Image (cartoon, helix red, strand yellow):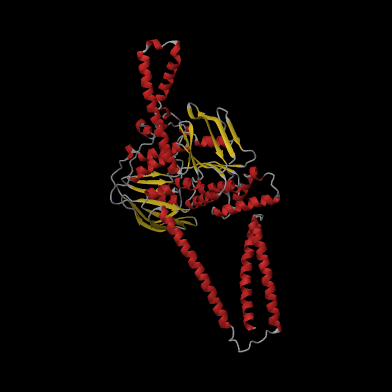
């Protein structure tokens, strides 16, 4: 396999904080790599350096294979709010489209329309300013995938996507022959797309072939081997220390090399591998929870002409753990705002029905938009408890750091701490996995499994949902909410089986309809005499014309299908061709039916 990327001696620091120093690695053609590291250790900085958006502090070398095309997906997509989706993509794609002839430009436009359709963005003329965060992310992904670049660099590609979009992206990347380097916290996505895990740890890079579970096992082996080697070095150090103490004459120039080696051993013996992890132990208590949590009766919510909730009735129970899933824009976050009473703080929507909250209810609401920090505040200004901060991986040297200097994951972790330290008995989490690293997610999952209160989670992280929830509210759109008892994976299996049954039912209904039509035709044809009559001159001419028409329609249909499959049609002609094929099929059915009648007369 060709080497697509070679990295040597690159470094990045922010003030006194060293993210990584003189690291290096190699990526070969066909590698699909997930980059894993704790928040704040420089994952995004590394990705930006590789994509040419930032520079290494120490120089170093970043060598891509000559002439390969690279596409970079940043966490935040820059766009013009007044442009349409299609125009935004085309104006941002000049790196891919510059120098293309008309034929290849049409092919690119066709791919753009195809991916937009796959991501459920059916109106390419819609303005960017009208899109949700998840829809903007799908536009960014469309631009990247349509480029058909050989090398994709992706920073948290699943953030803000609904599960349908994640599963489409997952399927496409797993089948693609592209080379890929991505940062992700989605463990199912990682396992189904990537063949390699790359860990950035204590300023070094470690590579593991295989899935996430294999990474965990091999990582533990590496740490155990490192610490075992440290123990051996300590034994040697003890012997050398005895030699130095018992042999004063050894301190001559003749034994200087051994003394120098002793100090090298001493440095190595002090290096025991430890990794700090977020500790939830101090957060395990919660305020006593009464029998009434939240009772909803016939709740409906409309915003303009849009319906986000239609006649929802449900009494939330003590200690239950509910997952909420659905497409972007289906009303999940709106629903949480209604439950918590936040909806009418700044929203003029119309809510009907009743909602009652228990007197002992204490809600901790971790919302998707995050906490509005003052960028000039320090970590200690936000949480004035050094012990808690240390348990959440904010050591003493970080306490006076301004919020604006924190990474996205560090801000999320600090925000989560402000919620949990209130000791709520109903915890509502809206997309809590965004920007949190995998290690923190695992610890958060373990904490939530033992949480002594009720839990409501909106998440696109399937692994997170599978580990935590008892049942799901499925937001289907237009205010419809369905309750499914079971995990998310069980729900997806149910949907697959249901869709297969529906396809089978549709095929059976189509077959039955054709048979019924044939019987109707047969019933309208007079019972054949012992000797069939000849067609009249007019009928014979009609028969000949029908045969020619059907041959002509078949040829036109084949020509249109070839054009559609070629990928060369612009968007407007693509629509026209699809509509014409539909008309041809209807006309063909009519003519074949009449042809059958004439054949029966002969």
Q: Choose between 269 and 71: the one closer to the eye.
A: 269
Residue extending farthest to the bottom is 530
Q: Position of residue 333 (x, y in %)?
A: 44, 49
| Residue ID at (55%, 79%) | 520
Where residue 300 appears, as percent x and y from the top left, is 42, 57
Residue 94 versus residue 150: which sits nearer the camera?
A: 150
Looking at the image, the residue that sits furthest to the front is: 254
Q: Quadrant of residue 391?
A: top left
Q: Nearer the viewer, residue 349 or 524?
A: 524
- Taking 500 as reference, is 266 above or below it? above
Please give left or right for residue 558 compared with residue 395 in the image.
right
The quarter of the picture where the C terminus appears is bottom right
Q: Position of residue 63 (x, y in %)?
A: 60, 34
* Residue drawn at (64%, 61%) of the image: 561
Residue 322 at least partly seen: yes
Above or below 227: residue 96? below
Please state if 359 lies on the left or on the right of 93 as rendered.
left
Examine the rendering and report whether any part of residue 298 can be seen. Answer: no
Up-down relation of residue 516 to residue 15 (above or below): below
How far across and down, in percent of the image, does residue 161 sit?
Answer: 49, 48
- For image coordinates 42% across by 22% down, the residue present is 265
Screen quadrant of the N terminus: top right
| Count of residue discs | 0
Q: Is residue 240 left or right of residue 360?
A: right
């Amino acid at each position: 396999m060709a080497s697509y990327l070679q990295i040597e001696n690159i470094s990045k620091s922010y003030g006194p904080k060293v993210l990584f120093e003189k690291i290096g690695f190699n990526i070969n053609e066909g590698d699909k790599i997930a980059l894993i590291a704790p928040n704040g250790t420089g994952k995004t900085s590394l990705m930006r350096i590789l994509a040419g958006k930032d520079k290494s502090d120490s120089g170093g070398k970043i060598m891509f294979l000559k002439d390969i095309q690279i596409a970079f997906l940043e966490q935040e997509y820059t766009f013009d709010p007044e442009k349409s989706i299609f125009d935004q993509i085309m104006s941002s794609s000049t790196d891919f489209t510059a120098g293309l002839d008309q034929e290849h430009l049409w092919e690119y436009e066709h791919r753009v329309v195809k991916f937009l359709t796959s991501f459920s963005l059916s109106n390419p003329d819609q303005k960017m300013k009208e899109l949700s965060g998840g829809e903007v992310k799908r536009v960014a992904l469309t631009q990247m995938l349509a480029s058909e670049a050989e090398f994709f660099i992706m920073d948290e590609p699943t953030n803000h996507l609904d599960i349908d979009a994640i599963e489409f992206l997952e399927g496409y990347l797993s089948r693609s022959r592209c080379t890929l380097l991505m940062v992700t916290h989605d463990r199912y996505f990682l396992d189904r797309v990537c063949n390699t895990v790359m860990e950035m740890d204590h300023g070094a890079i470690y590579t593991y072939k295989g899935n996430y579970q294999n990474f965990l096992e091999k990582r533990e082996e590496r740490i155990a081997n490192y610490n075992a080697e440290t123990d051996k070095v300590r034994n040697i150090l003890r012997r050398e220390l005895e030699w130095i103490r018992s042999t004063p004459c050894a301190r001559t120039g003749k034994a200087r090399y051994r003394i120098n080696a002793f100090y090298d051993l001493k440095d190595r013996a002090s290096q025991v591998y430890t990794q700090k992890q977020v500790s939830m132990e101090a957060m395990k208590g919660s305020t006593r929870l009464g029998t009434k949590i939240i009772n909803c009766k016939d709740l409906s919510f409309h915003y303009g002409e849009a319906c986000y909730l239609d006649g929802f009735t449900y009494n939330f129970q003590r200690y239950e753990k509910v997952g909420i899933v659905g497409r972007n824009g289906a009303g999940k976050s709106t629903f949480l705002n209604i439950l918590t009473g936040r909806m009418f703080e700044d929203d003029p929507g119309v809510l009907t029905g009743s909602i009652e909250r228990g007197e002992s209810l204490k809600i901790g609401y971790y919302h998707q938009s995050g906490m509005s920090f003052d960028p000039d505040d320090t970590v200690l200004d936000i949480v004035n408890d050094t012990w808690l901060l240390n348990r959440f991986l904010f050591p003493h040297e970080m306490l006076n750091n301004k919020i604006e200097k924190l990474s996205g994951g560090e801000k999320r972790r600090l925000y989560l701490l402000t919620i949990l330290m209130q000791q709520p008995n109903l915890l509502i989490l809206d997309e809590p996995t965004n920007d949190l690293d995998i290690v923190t997610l695992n610890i958060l999952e373990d904490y939530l499994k033992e949480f002594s209160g009720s839990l409501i989670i909106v998440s696109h992280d399937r692994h997170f949902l599978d580990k935590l929830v008892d049942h799901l509210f499925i937001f289907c759109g237009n205010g419809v909410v369905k309750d499914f008892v079971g995990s998310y994976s069980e729900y997806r299996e149910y949907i697959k089986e249901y869709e297969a049954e529906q396809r089978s039912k549709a095929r059976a209904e189509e077959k039955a309809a054709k048979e019924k039509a044939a019987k109707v035709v047969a019933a309208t044809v007079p019972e054949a005499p012992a000797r069939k009559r000849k067609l009249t001159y007019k009928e014979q001419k009609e028969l000949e014309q029908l045969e020619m028409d059907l041959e002509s329609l078949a040829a036109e249909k084949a020509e249109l299908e070839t054009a559609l499959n070629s990928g060369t049609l612009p968007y407007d002609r693509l629509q026209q061709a699809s509509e014409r094929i539909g008309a041809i099929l209807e006309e063909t059915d009519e003519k074949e039916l009449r042809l059958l009648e004439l054949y029966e007369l002969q």
